Amino acid sequence: MEEEFWQYSKNIYAKSSKSFLWLQDERSLDVNLLLFCYWLGEKGKRLTVDDISRCCKNVEFLRRDFIIPLRNSRQFLKNADLPIDCKKLKQAILAVELEGERTEQRILISSLSKASVECQVTDHEDITIMHHNILNYLRYEKVDLDGAVKSTLNEIALSLFPYLSREVLYKSFLQHSAD
């Protein structure tokens, strides 16, 4: 399951990296948690706010004390006006940061029982469950589903479901924001 989630994450992130980074940088959301919400939604697993809380608490120390400091160090090097090229150092930090992200994903998976991940999904129910999961994550983080957040999440959803219209996605969010 870990490898499946990692490959899914790499695929969806490659399609929507700017959207994920915006949610991370502008709303302080955890990209791995968002990816987890999408992945589990596709599998038909609805996350409760308690599930999200448990997942967030289980990865909090790793994010706070390892992943975020590495990201900050890499960004510092990217923006620093140093008299030498630090390309190898940035690449080394990125490699360690990615391994930290992968470790976070393992922790997220271990936060739920394997049996609770495997569910049946009917046609187009996956987008509804994804929205449910993401909205519960936003509630947990106390992030408003404002126009900018909704638009960014819709961009991600459109990369996953290019055949759906923006109107269908918007209605799905409206339907679930009242839950």
Image (cartoon, helix red, strand yellow):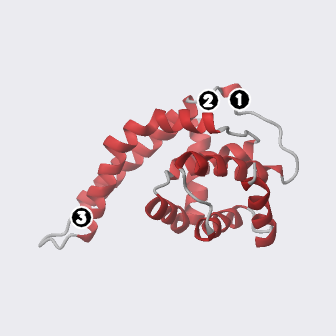
x, y (%) of residue 140? 57, 45
Front disc: 1 or 3 = 1
**Between discs 1 and 3, the one toward the N terminus:** 3
Q: Is residue 165 visible?
A: no
48 above or below 69?
above
- Along the horizontal axis of the image, is 141 left or right of 42? left
Please, what secondary structure does the residue beneath circle 3 have? Answer: helix
Say which mark, if any, is on residue 116: 1
What's the residue at 72%, 55% (across, down)? 177
Image coordinates for residue 56, horizontal then vertical, percent: 50, 39
Quickly name the residue at label 2.
Answer: 112
* 127, 82: nearer the viewer: 127
Residue on which the image places disc 3: 77
Q: Looking at the picture, which amino acid does disc 1 mark?
A: Ser
Q: Nearer the viewer, residue 155 or 12?
A: 155
- List x then y, in percent, for residue 137: 60, 47
